[in-house]
Amino acid sequence: MSVVSNNIVKEYKRRGASFTALDDVDIEVKEGKITAIMGRSGSGKSTLLNVLAGMIKPESGAVTIDGMNIFEKDLRSRDKLRAEKIGIVPQSHSLISGLTAYENIILQNSFSEHDRQSGEGTLAEIVTFLGLDELMDVYPGSLSGGEMKRVSIARALFGNLKYLFADEPTGELDNDNSKKVMELFRSQAERGKGILIVTHDKLVADMADIVYTMENGKLSLL
């Protein structure tokens, strides 16, 4: 099974003029594989990730998740599908300030039907691997940018969802932590998770199975 886009077109207006953010884009995110998209800022990478996750509706084209055309569903149904299938690491910080790191991590499961207890063992492994054990009772306001990013990654992986979409997951991490994150992603892919990463980081691209480049809304295999 996989996440597949066919002929995706997304347009925006800027200062009264239209521009094409995604220009007839086809891509497949396969289970058990790490797929990376590289490109300059503004090339359309994040827009594509958000379309594939069902958060942005394209002007035309189709996105299927495990054979289901998600844009044939209403917004609420898409939200439910995403909560049950896709863990997302956003580019910007999205932790809730009034919740501890641990509470932010387990929040994902409150929106899905996955059994929380079944993921606790895996969560402990992830937290330890990412060096977050001592930070579980800390609030986001006391975390560094890199620590918040690692908490976001742990949150996206909690619950053993089928897919992980990560937008610049190593953007605020040093080389050692970037390598750890990619090692963790690799172990998740080996367990069958389909992983999509939007990145500027060559280290990330070098550790991916499939690498695309995006320029001016056009996607091509590297």
Image (spheres, helix red, strand yellow):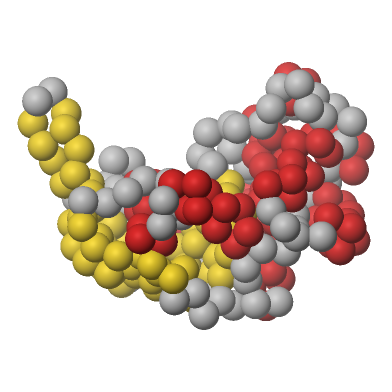
Q: Quadrant of the C terminus?
A: bottom left
What residue do we see at 86% from left, 34% from top? 135
Q: On the rendered structure, is 87 left or right of 177?
A: left
Q: On the rendered structure, is 203 left or right of 19?
A: right
**Where 69 falls versus 51 (above or below)?**
below
**Where 214 falls versus 220 (above or below)?**
above
Q: On the rendered structure, is 94 left or right of 1?
A: right
**Where 13 falls versus 168 (above or below)?**
above
Q: Position of residue 187 (x, y in %)?
A: 71, 71
For the residue pair 149 and 62, the one nearer the viewer reads as 62
What residue do we see at 56% from left, 76% from top? 31
What residue do we see at 74% from left, 45% from top? 110
Question: Could you tell me if residue 115 is visible in this image?
Answer: yes
For the residue pair 78 and 196, the one nearer the viewer reads as 78
Q: Position of residue 164 (x, y in %)?
A: 58, 60
Res 189 → quadrant: bottom right
Q: On the rendered structure, is 11 left or right of 77?
A: left
Q: Position of residue 165 (x, y in %)?
A: 53, 56
Q: Residue furthest left?
A: 17
What residue do we see at 30% from left, 65% from top? 62
For the residue pair 107 and 123, the one nearer the viewer reads as 107
Question: Could you tell me if residue 185 is visible in this image?
Answer: no
Counting the numbered discs, the total is 0
